[in-house]
Each structure stands twice: as C-alpha cells, then as structure tokens.
Image (spheres, rainbow, N blue to C red):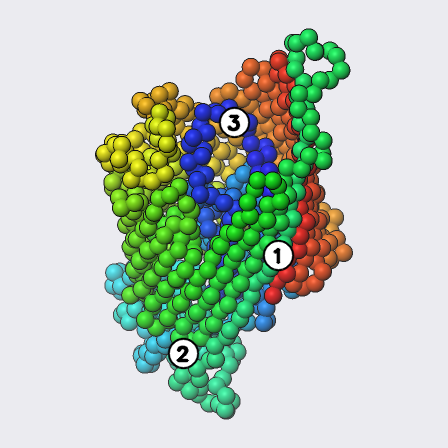
Amino acid sequence: MKNQLFGRPVAPHVRLAPLALLCAAGLAQAQVIEEVELRREGDNAIVQVRFTVPVQYRRSVAASSNDLVQIVYDVVPSRDKPNFIDGERRQVGGDGIPRVSISEEGGGSGENDRRLIVRLDPPTRFKVRSGGDRRSIEIVLEGQGPKMFSAPAAKTAPRAPAPPPTAPAGGDAQVDARGAELLAQARAALDKGQAALAVETLNEALNLPPNPHTREAQALVGQARMAQGDVAGARSEFELFLKLYPEGPDADQARVTLAGLPRAEGAAAGSAAPSAEPARQGTTMLVGGISQYYYGGNSKVQTQLKDTPLEGQLPVVISDQTLAGIDQKQLLSSVDLNWRSKDAERDLRFVFRDSFTVNQMPGQAEENKLSALYVDWKETRPGLSARVGRQSGLGGGVLGRFDGVQLGWAFQPKWKLSAVAGLPTDKLLDTKRHFYGFSLDAESLAPGLGANTYLIQQMIDGEVDRRALGGDVRYVEPGISVFTQFEYDLTLQGVNIGSVQGTWTSADNTTVNLLLDRRATPMLMLGNALFFPDPLLTVLPRKLTDLLALKPIDLLRQQVADTTAYATQGLLGVTTPLNTQWQVGADLRLTNIGAIAPVPGILPDGIPATGNLWSAGVQAIGSNLYSERDTHVFNVTAVRGPTYTGWLASYNNLSVLAERWQVEPSLRFYQQNGPSGLQTSRWAPGLRLTWRGGEKWVLESDFNLEASHSRSPTQNENSVRLYYSLGYRLDF
C-alpha cells in the first residue's frame, strides 16, 4: 500500500517504539466505511455513510454539474483506527432514486486526513452535513424523498374534529411555553427522520388547551404522517386542518398538498379516502461489489559518508538498490455483499465483507480479513432489533470489530435499551478475551439534545481486563453538531477518554470545526501489561496467567497505570466560500503525547514526552475552473516540534474528462530541519486514473513517486520509492 506518512514529521522520539507497538497491536488492513444507509426525511432522501471509527466532517467541494463531490473529513483519535485501504467503494440507490457511488481514500496532507469521492447518477441537487453521531456523514438528496419506498409505521387514529382552537388574549403562559417546546421537538425529530416520534409529540401538543402554536402543530402533523408513509392518516389530518382553518396561506398550501396525495384504488374523485390505506408490499434488494487490486513497490537507497577519506571521491554507495529491487508485491481481492428485505413490519439484512491478500514477497504470508458477516433484524412495532455475527461496535464502549451479538429495545419513542456481548477479533498474543455490556440511549431530551450512558466489562484469561463506565451527550440541529464523550475505568481507576467535537455550518456554507481530545494511549486494559514484561525473563509471557505466576494482580494493574501515557489533540479549522468557484480555509492543530515515568525493572529510563507538536495550514479550494467537473486543492502547512521545524506544500486535482475518464494528478513537497544539522526534503508526484467502463464497473490505477534527500554533517542519503496499483471494481 502506498505510504500514508508522507508529510508527517520524521519521528525524533525513537524511544516511543514500545508504545507505538502496543497501539498498533492487532491492527490490520481494514475498511473504514461500516455501511451506507438510505432513508427518507420529509421531501428529501438521506444517504448516511457510517464509519468504523469516529470522524469529523470538514468541508465538501462540489462540481457545478451536481454529479460529483469530494467530502473531506478527519479520523478522530481512537484506539480502533484501522490501516486504511484506499479505494474502498459503496453504492446505494436505483429504482427511481439517484445511484450514489462512494469511494473512500486518503486526503493527501496527513495520515488522518481522508476524503469521500461521491458520484450521483443522474445529477441531483444535494448538500453535505455531519451525521447524527460521531461515526457518520450524511448526503441530503433534495426532493428525492417521495421516490423512496417508505413502509408505513403503526398508525394512530387522527383526533376528532374540535372547535377552532383560537387562543384567547392573555392565555396561559405555561401552556404557550409547552406548546412551543413540543413544536420545536417535533421539528427536530422530523429533521432527523424520526417521523413516529414527531407524530407522538405533535399529538401531545394538540391535546393542550388552545394556544398560539396549535394551528402550526395541526399543519405539521400532516407532514409527519406523510414522512411515515401513512397517506390515509396524512389526508385525514389535512382535511381536519382545513375544517378548522379554511383561510390563510397555510390553508392554501394544505389544499395543494391534499390534492397531490394519492387516493386508494377505486376511490372516486371527491370522495373520502378509506380510514387506512392497503398494506404495501415489501422490497428485497441485493447490492454490493467485487474488486481486485495489485500493489507494487520498488525502492532505491544511496548513502554517502562525509568527513572520511572517501569524501570528495566518486560516490561510494554503502547501500545501493536499483528500482528493480522490488519490496512490495500484493494482490488484494475483496467482496462486499448486502442483501435486504424490508416491509411495514420488519427490516432484515445480511452483510458479508471480506478481503484476501496474496503477499508475493519472500517470507510474507497470505492474509484473509473478514470485516463483516452478520444478520441484522429490526421489528417495527415492538421496537426490537438484533445484530448477530462479525461486526463493528455501534457505540456503548465497544472497541473495534468483534464476533457476537447486539440487542436493542426501543421501549419508548425517546428511549432505547441495548446489550452487547462478544469476542474481540484482534488477537493479543495467546490470551482469551470476551466482553459484555449495557447501554441506555435517550433522544430529544430537549430539541436536538440526546445522550447515552454505558457500562462494559471485558475479561482476559479469567480476570477483569477492562471495566468502563462512560457516556456521551450530543446536540444536533440544522447547521450545528456537538458531541462529547467521557469514559472512566472503574478497575484501573483512570480516565480513558475526555473529548469534545463540534461542527458549525452557516447559511453561506462557512464551516467551523473544533476538537479537544485527551485519552489514554493505549486505552487502560490489564492486558497491556503483556507489552512491558521484565526484560530479564528468558521466555516472554504470552498469556496473562504467565504474568500472574510472577506478580500479583494488584502490581500488574499498577504497572499498566505506570506505563500508560496520555495523548492530547486539538483542532480549530474554518472553511468559507469566496464565490461560486473558490473556498479558502485555515486550521491549527496540536498533538502532545505525555511522558511515561521510569518503572524499575520495566522501563528504567521511562519514555519522554513528545512536547507540543504544532501545525498551521491554509488551503485554497477551487472548483469548475475549466469544466463542470474539476476541483483543485492548494495547501501549505507549517509544522513545529521541540526538535524540528518543517513545512508542507501540496496540490491535488480531480477532473472528469470525456465522461468516462477521471484524472487525479497530485504533487507534494516537504522540508524539515531537525536536530544536529539534519535536513530532509521530499518530493512526491502522483497520478490516479479511473476509467468507468459502464454504470457498474471501473478500472483504476495509481502511480506515486517519492524522492527523499537527507543531509547532515556526517552523511548524505538519497532514496527513491515508486509505488503503484492497478485494479478493477464491479458493482451489482
């Protein structure tokens, strides 16, 4: 795979290697997109992209043709960050809904900077926003909601006609305030696609004594029933509205909406619709894709000593490999299969995602990565759900992928109780681990406000590995999202996570991002003690029971606390449009990994802190400069640490030529001044080509060259690395 670390500072803290090894334990090449869902939200269709890791939406760059957009996002710090696979694809839509094809790949300016390339066929008006949680981004397809199949939820009989509720002057202030609150909650529920909750909330509002908000609530409940797919109920609500309020602009709009509602088969024009529409038939669909990509790499390194008798003579090469010296040969094959059956009562899905890597280099083994193999079931009326098989955690303190089961019960419209149990799929030497936990979710505690709390316990070789109490609070309204998270380990008695993440988007599409995150690195778990054994042992332990034979559990827990560092990360960024073709952005980032104090017999010298690592960048983003489908990103970033300074300049272009060809040239240059006079510079030109042979299949290739030159008072080193890939993707 291509190097993800270009442009990152050359790590001066080699002594952090044990910590890096621990953080990377069990990680393998993995997909970052968990699933892509399509739902209706009023008149719009929502494409929700869910990720396996927490993310933060940064900005979008759209083509004027309304069929191509780049969505830039950051991967938020977490323990279960995968090694990314560029080119991962998903697609949804069809049957009247625009087909949406999504490709995930690196953003080019850093390891955690990622982007989605989204194509829409046919072109459709859309907008991009943060999702309703920390693991999702949403694409709003404007006006596409009525084209979707929408199974009707359980219907509530409309209220009987009542006298026109005109609020008397000087009415009850408490009733007025309650009416306003319920109306705001209903609108928030509709914005998030929770039509059933909106209907329930509006019914409560309409049962209040007459107040200034009653008329608006009666109009909105018809819209809410339409969002449910309850056409007969919507018709009854609008007819009741016109009886109570026959005059006014909202009455005229109600007549237009009522005239556009479909009638039950056999109903004569002008006659009343039946009390309930016939049950709709369900839908069954199969979507997915298969792909194969070959990854190759070649390197050449030349090192010349200075201040020796050899200096000034013909170059003497200490290490010299030609570009024929192949250091990477991999064939990656993957399959993505999604089967779904949905009707008015239930939603049943089967998901299978797997990749197989053939390593053709000597001494490297083949690797199979089963990312997902689960059955997901939801029952509408009782609010029950279950997911069984290999899957990623959907919250509740679950770390990474696991084999197990998640159960849910929405026992009230605003409340959901969940349980989870399983076995982690990432291996930790020869240990045996399992976990179980419970969580409680609440929605619409106030307009846009939700919360979650969880308790989770993980066992390792019969002992408590992790016992964590945590939760989050989220606020999501149109244009703004704020997510907070906190977790405390009750056994190891330390804070695992404290995080605040927010995104604000104005009416003119200015976006402001904020992140403050502090967490244990790695997360506090008893099994971490296996990575810091006594160096005097002749045989290193591979199970927790091996360590317990040498030390009591209390000392092992103290050892974990003593060998855990805390990482602090911060981000403040802003992007704003200048006109229809240009946006400008700026961001400031901070990273600091704290020190580990000396631990006798384990880390006698400890591990020093990194100090504050700062980066400040500016971006200019252009679109449609010479066509309807070209985008350009210019970036300059300055970096500074306690022992080095550097700067990165990059350019990325995406252009669609002759409909079938997508061309993405790029160029990056990085220069760094380090300790003891060490200077490093790197050039990296690249080119990605995509040819769409048809609606459902593409050929893709990627070529990147990285030339690096390092010089110091004692030696010069030049290296060249070429990495490339070629493959295809077939969707069905």
- Residue 257, percent across and down? 50, 75
Q: Which residue is mark 1?
A: 291
Q: Is residue 726 visible?
A: yes
Kindly identify the amino acid type of the residue bearing the numbered disc 3: Ala
* Residue nearest the observer in this picture, 675 or 545: 545
Q: Quadrant of residue 171?
A: bottom left
Which residue carries the number 3 mark?
11
Q: Quadrant of the C terminus?
A: bottom right
Which amino acid lies under the numbered mark 2 shown in the image of this protein? Gly
| Earlier-in-chain disc, 3 versus 2 | 3
Query: At numbered mark 3, what does the secondary structure look like: helix, strand or loop?
Result: loop
Q: Are marks 1 and 3 in contact (CB under 8 Å)?
A: no
Real-space CA distance between mark 1 and mark 3, rounded to the nearest whole angstrom: 35 Å
Q: Is residue 667 visible?
A: no
Q: Secondary structure at mark 1?
A: strand
Q: Amino acid at mark 1?
A: Ser
- Taking the view exactly as shown, the residue that stands out farthest to the front is 538
Tag 3: Cα neighbours inside 10 Å, few (<14), some, or many (≥20)? Answer: few
Identity of the residue drawn at 33% across and 56% down: 420
Mark 2 vs mark 1: in front = 1
